[in-house]
Amino acid sequence: MLGLLRVRSPILKSSHSLSFRHPALLQQRSLSLFIIQQRPTLFQQQRSSTTARFLSLASIFSRPKPTAAPTPLVVAHITRLEAEANVHPHDVSKQLLLFEALSNTKLKSSYDLIITRWERMCEFDPSSPLLHSTAAFKFYITCLLITGQQPSINPAVRRRDSLLIAHPLATTSPTLAMTELETPATSQEIAQAILSAPPVNSAPSTESTPNLAKLAVGGEAASSNPIQVAIVERKGAWIPRLVRFISLVLVSSFFFLVILSVFFENSGFMKAGPRQSQFEPTEGKTVKFSDVHGVDEAKDELQDVVAFLKDPTAFASLGGKLPKGVLLTGPPGTGKTMLARAVAGEAGVPFFFASGSDFEEMFVGVGAKRVRELFAAARKKEPAIIFIDELDAVGGKRSNRDQQYMKQTLNQLLVEMDGFQQNEAIIVIAATNFPESLDQALVRPGRFDRIIAVPLPDVRGRVQILQHHMRDVTTSKDVDPKILARGTPGFSGADLQNMVNQAAIQASKERAAEVSLKHFEWAKDRILMGAERKSQYIDQKAKLATAYHEGGHALVALYTDGAMPLHKVTCVPRGHALGYTSLLPENDRTSVSLKEYLAGIDVSMGGRVAEELIYGYENVTSGASSDIKNATRTAQSMVKHWGFSKLGPVFYDDREDNLSPRRKEEIEEEITTIVRGGEARATALLTAKLDELHRLAHALVEHETLDSDEVRKVIKGEPIRTITEVLDEEIANAQS
């Protein structure tokens, strides 16, 4: 980048020698030095405009064409000629030398300077001999033509003719001795000659460009009197060039890599050989039907599949065919995967496992490809069993809004299960928690011939599961699986296994010799209510408020007919709650009546009602938010789904788009009425039992956790074991 131009000459080192040689030359040198150092010349302005474009968007991705700037030596020469022309304004030869040097640069700014000098001469010095110079006027007209100012040519011709008439040439002028003027032609002839000539790129020249070495300062040779030019680069000028270079490299590298990857992908030059399929028979412990408990009906259904795999000819002789698919439905943790492994273990055939999410990936077509690989691997090992867990992840109902790759995966699964290519010795067993979300084409006979429900285990099933998992655990004599089974309604097989494992871990942490009933109760409470947060600090005031809240739930559960029996109540923070009231049914509940639903709403509202009775309406806390949510959901289901309202036995969808505004208002009014009714009943009950509420709350603050028997003793005023007695008993048991 061309920044400032500083011209230094050895002659300038001695002002005396400069003055001695020529006084006018000193003025000329000083003027040239001042012009170059103090004001930007027309060439510097041209370079500055180029520099200003360095940070534009176009300059980042494409290098702009640099303007052919004159060399520093030419700049110094033109500056000297300009100074001499200014000192001798009536010397036509010096003016022509300046015009010629400017036109040789072929810069628009040079042409503009020639036009400006001519017009200023006409304006302020019309008697100048330069006006009578044909060559000078040719320079002026040519510059107008090159810069696109053709409309100004005719006015310029008329103006010169008028000035020539008004100011004839003075032959006695002393400046005439310095040059010999040619006979002036008319302005119109000069203009017509230039306009009729071929297009030109620069102004005409009256003589060749002079030798720059001979035109050095003082008229001496350049070797004896050189012009030294220092090019000072603007600070930070390298940054735009670096940014442009890095951007160009990055863009070029990106396109190069894209083209290279496309080439390798299409040519197969670097493709690896056929990769091994990721679906292989599952190895591990063989599972039998004797290892699966609590699902006797499902095991009976699958016995037919096992028998067919063991002896296909016994069924084929009578025309029977093996079911192609078995769909296992039920809540999580009920043993669906164990059942599928047990079928493979009983039949002694390879077992291929895949999850519904394994088929999908970010690339289109991968899902269908993996389905083909799975069935191809199973055909090589047939007879075999394919188990697809979480089938709803890949077999959901299709719609027009689905992406194409999702449809491809499901379509490939449909074709593999019942397509042109038959799989007589391959059984597909799938499991899902949401059978209603599966596509109808997938669950039709011919693909999934049998749909087997795997529900939560009942009391007998829970006893079997507990006995199975407690075989490898050292338990005390007071542990009865039947008692634990009755106290764990709604537990799945996975929950029961987790409870046994956590009880064993807790006993090991306490250095106990065996797992006692206390450890199983601790594990059950941890699963039901969450882990205790004993390290959380709660002041006595907040703890007492929590005790009143949980005491309200407990009292309403004790005195409300139809409510589930109270199991345990605590004011110790568990999970995300500050307290918890646990209710457990005595037996498995297969259906729920209207009275039981209303009792559940009463129990949910009991905590908030207790706070309002003790602290007032304005001091009720937000701790009852989950209780209000549960009560509202129960009331909503009673009105919309179960027909327990004044609206009658009518089912209303959860989506309210199809309901009229009047019907929506009626439904909301019924829901509010049911919840308000539960609140009123809880208020009446706790108002009558206010003394018992006080006793229960203070006992909870002292003991923190009470079971149902202890709650009954407390509200009757009977004493219970103190904390000290409980701790002493635990220490004695640990020592023994």
Image (cartoon, helix red, strand yellow):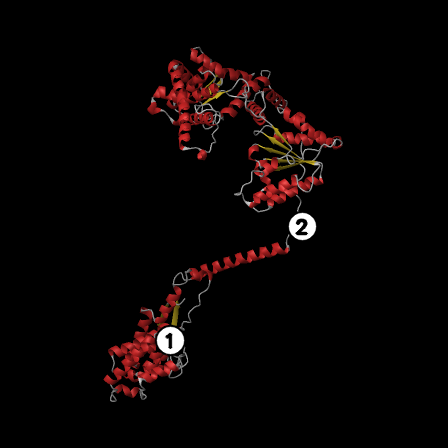
Which of the 4 quarters of the picture holds residue 515? top right
Q: Which mark is residue 273?
A: 2
Query: Which secondary structure, mark 2?
Result: loop
Whichever of callouts 1 and 2 sits on the residue coming sooner in the sequence is 1
Q: Residues within 10 Å of mark 2 (few under 14, many from 20)?
A: few
* 420 displayed left or right of 150: right
Residue at the left extreme of this rendering: 166
Residue 609, percent across and down? Answer: 38, 21
Q: Which mark is residue 54?
A: none
- Mark 1 residue type: Ile
Q: Is residue 18 visible?
A: no
Spatial CA distance of label 1 from label 2 is 70 Å
Q: Residue at x 41, y 19 (%)?
A: 552
Q: Is residue 498 visible?
A: yes
Q: Residue at x 36, y 21 (%)?
A: 612
- Mark 2 residue type: Gly
How many circles with numbers are drawn on the protein?
2
Disc 1 target residue? 146
* 423 displayed left or right of 214: right
